[in-house]
Image (cartoon, helix red, strand yellow):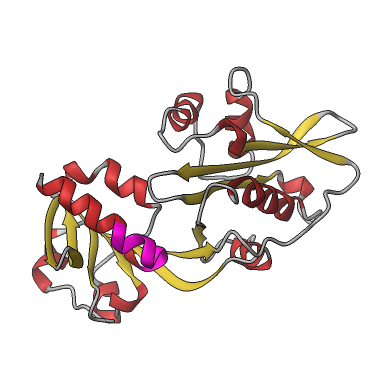
């Protein structure tokens, strides 16, 4: 009952400020909430503060009534990893962790969707989930040096409750009839949240606005069902995905940091 109450209160807080309350889509937190210790305060059924952690990681820590929260020294010593909003971080915290990666989280209102035409040498089609999972894995692997999801991992995505087969799309090059770009989105009907998970264009096809085509197509497919759509990405990515998403109507200024010892 305690976890159910917390989950419901967290969902209510999240929909009012999705980019500030959690670093990821809400369902990812709720899916593993039983694996965390929790400490929270509520007032008139409203969640006022929340701390989620396990033996290794501080996952969530915020207070609705404060713009800045100090992470105490005991927590900094205890955890090997913390996920912290920009408003909480300072130089003293940074010094205690070996590595820091920063991620933006943006939101789209699912109303003001830009219109863009796909270049005439390409077309969009749905991914065939039954036969093309290995192709999804291959394309993502060919876009990164350090991210290599295998077939088993991609198959797990299909089994998530937020999976919809019409939110997995290719951009196909007409000349070769081969996929050159991939878009994957998810839909959480519990809170009507859309999330862009993968927007990938093969490096040799950059500069053709195919990423923007993927984003706008997925937003159009989400629009009848989702009240808002979120997206996140690495701040220091050389391809500057934040610029792409902002050009498609995403807004916000929230930055989350993942610190590791």
Q: Residue furthest top?
A: 131
How far across and how far down the image is residue 259, in percent?
Answer: 31, 62
Quadrant of image for the N terminus: top left
Of residues 105 and 204, the one nearer the viewer is: 105
Q: Based on the picture, tell me whether residue 42 belongs to the magenta stretch.
A: no
Quadrant of image for the C terminus: bottom left
**Could you tell me which residue is drawn at 87 percent across and 49 percent down?**
119
Of residues 47 and 54, the one nearer the viewer is: 47
Of residues 220 and 119, the one nearer the viewer is: 220
**Could you tell me which residue is drawn at 24 percent across and 81 percent down?**
66
Q: Is residue 125 left or right of residue 64?
A: right
**Could you tell me which residue is drawn at 45 percent across and 24 percent down?**
152
Q: Main secondary structure of the magenta part?
A: helix
Q: What range is drawn magenta here?
A: 12-20
How far across and how far down the image is residue 74, in percent?
Answer: 8, 68
**Could you tell me which residue is drawn at 10 percent across and 48 percent down?**
2
Is any atom of residue 84 visible in this view?
A: yes
How far across and how far down the image is residue 185, in percent?
Answer: 55, 44
How far across and how far down the image is residue 236, in percent?
Answer: 53, 65
Is any atom of residue 259 visible in this view?
A: no
Q: Please tell me whether residue 43 is drawn above or below residue 222 in the rendered image.
A: below
Task: Report which quarter residue 86 is drawn in.
Answer: bottom left
Of residues 160 and 103, the one nearer the viewer is: 160
Q: Is residue 218 left or right of residue 185?
A: right
């Amino acid at each position: 009952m305690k976890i159910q109450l917390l989950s419901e209160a967290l969902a209510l807080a999240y929909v009012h400020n999705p980019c500030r309350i959690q670093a990821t889509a809400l369902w990812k937190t709720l899916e593993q909430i039983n694996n965390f210790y929790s400490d929270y305060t509520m007032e008139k059924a409203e969640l006022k503060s929340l701390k989620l952690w396990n033996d290794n990681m501080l996952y969530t820590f915020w207070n609705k009534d404060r713009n800045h929260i100090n992470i105490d020294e005991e927590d900094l010593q205890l955890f090997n990893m913390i996920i912290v909003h920009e408003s909480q971080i300072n130089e003293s915290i940074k010094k205690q962790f070996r590595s820091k990666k920063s991620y933006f989280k943006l939101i789209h209102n699912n109303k003001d969707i830009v219109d863009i035409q796909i270049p005439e040498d390409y077309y969009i089609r749905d991914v065939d989930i039954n036969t093309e999972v290995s192709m999804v894995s291959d394309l993502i692997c060919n876009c990164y040096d350090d991210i290599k999801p295998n077939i088993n991992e991609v198959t797990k995505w299909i089994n998530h409750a937020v999976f919809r087969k019409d939110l997995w799309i290719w951009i196909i090059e007409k000349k070769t009839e081969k996929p050159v770009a991939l878009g994957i989105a998810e839909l959480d009907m519990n809170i009507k949240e859309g999330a862009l998970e993968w927007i990938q264009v093969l490096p040799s096809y950059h500069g053709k606005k195919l990423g923007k085509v993927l984003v706008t197509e997925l937003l159009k497919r989400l629009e009848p069902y989702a009240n808002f759509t979120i997206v996140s990405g690495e701040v220091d990515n050389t391809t500057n995905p934040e610029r792409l998403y902002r050009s498609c109507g995403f807004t916000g200024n929230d930055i989350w940091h993942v610190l590791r010892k």
